[in-house]
Amino acid sequence: MALGPRLEVNQTQRLSMTPQLRQAISLLQMSNVELFDHIAEEVEKNPLLELVEPETLHDDFVATPRGNTELAPIHSTVSSGNFEDFDPLANIVDEKTLRDMLREQILLSDRNPARAACALVLVDELDEHGWLTAPLFEIADRLGVPQAAIEEALETLQACDPVGIGARDLRECLEIQLKDADNFTDVMQVLTANLDALAINDLPKLETLAKVPHAELDDAIKALRQLNPKPAAHFDNGIVQVAIPDVTVGPSAVGGWSVELNTDALPKALVNEQYFSEVAKDGSEASEYVTECRANARFLVKAMDQRAKTILRVATVIVRHQNRFFDEGINGLRPLTLATVAKELDIHESTVSRVTSGKYLYCLRGTFELRFFFVQGIGRNDGGNDIAAPVVREKIRKLVAEEQPGKVLSDEKIAKMLQEDGVDVARRTVAKYREAMGIPSSSQRRRKTFNFGLR
């Protein structure tokens, strides 16, 4: 065959990420306050775009730092005052918060975009002490990534200042600080591994384990007590940020529950068609510019409308699956995954993930983030439907709370009691959930807790 240049026509199909598509995806992930800021920026660049501020906002919906694995609801009441003068930007302060500082450190230190993105998510999971109380497997399941990716992201977070940030328990918090100070000696390893013995001041046992004289052990204990068990204690975590519900749920007139968009809280944008007509009619160079501006403005308005419709569709499916929760509370939760909602709406799982991140639902039981309703399922040994993991954790919490001082329940005993109740759960699963909720082991519950200033 002779070699030489030639022309060929090939037909291929590919998806291109246009600037408009990127904008639509980013809008979907924004909260209402972030969306307001974004539109305000677009208004400054586009003379045909006009911003209509939200007229009414519910004043008492607030978001507080999450401190437990259940993504606790934000209890609130709705007042009926006039909120026309409400400014959604009034809660933004110039002083950097701890979370702002951590985000900056992560973005500067980690060159791996995927790992940095996961680490930024972990920042929002920290409690008021600076601890990471949510189990890694739950965060991984929520984000749809392997647990190993979250573990790598946690290393990035724990490398940030203040030292000890991102620890999952007291032992890890102390060990991070000791390693940073190059003081994680054999004696310190014994002390951090036996905090229960330290709690009851069992010095003979500690001396035997550490194999050091009493004086050296005493110095090590004094050094350990100088560490900070609450890395976030010196930062102001009490700033209340507005968490305006995107949807409201209430009893329907025909039974069941109705889901409605909180349109009063949605920022609105308008396209000034009259101004476009005046500028474009003369056919000058400015007409080309305003034509492009009108196209961009129309796309933004359309993307905002699509965002609102998608939020409502996703919230409606969530409420339909979790309708018992609104009657019974936590015990009414059912297993639900992103894939289930995505399949029912014929959209991608990543779209559901973006819609439920930072979006809130208000009902008579309080205000909840939409992702609160996505829970893992645990099988039953009696042939019934799977039971939601938060329900199992609540059962474990209740069993521990009701145990008698002289009859502390072991993980094995709790597992057997749950199995008798129809829950197919193993001892290691009970231990995992117990640790995730911050409940000490049975042996630790028999002893007095060592006071590191956490109470």
Image (tube, rainbow, N blue to C red):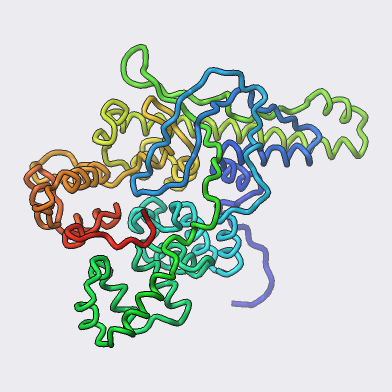
In the image, residue 437 sits, relative to residue 183, either above or below, namely: above
Quarter holding the N terminus?
A: bottom right
Q: How many marks?
A: 0
In the image, residue 133 sits, relative to residue 386, either above or below, namely: below
Q: Which residue occupies 42% across, 72% down? A: 176
In the image, residue 266 sits, relative to residue 229, either above or below, namely: above
In the image, 335: left or right of 33?
left
Q: Position of residue 303 (x, y in %)?
A: 61, 36
Q: Residue furthest front?
A: 215
In the image, 260: left or right of 331?
right
Q: Position of residue 359 (x, y in %)?
A: 49, 38
Q: Residue furthest top?
A: 253
Q: Quadrant of residue 41?
A: top right
Q: Which residue occupies 52% across, 46% down? A: 238
Q: Quadrant of residue 37?
A: top right
In the image, 397: left or right of 319?
left
Q: Which residue occupies 12% across, 57% down? A: 410
> 449 or 74, which lies in front?
449
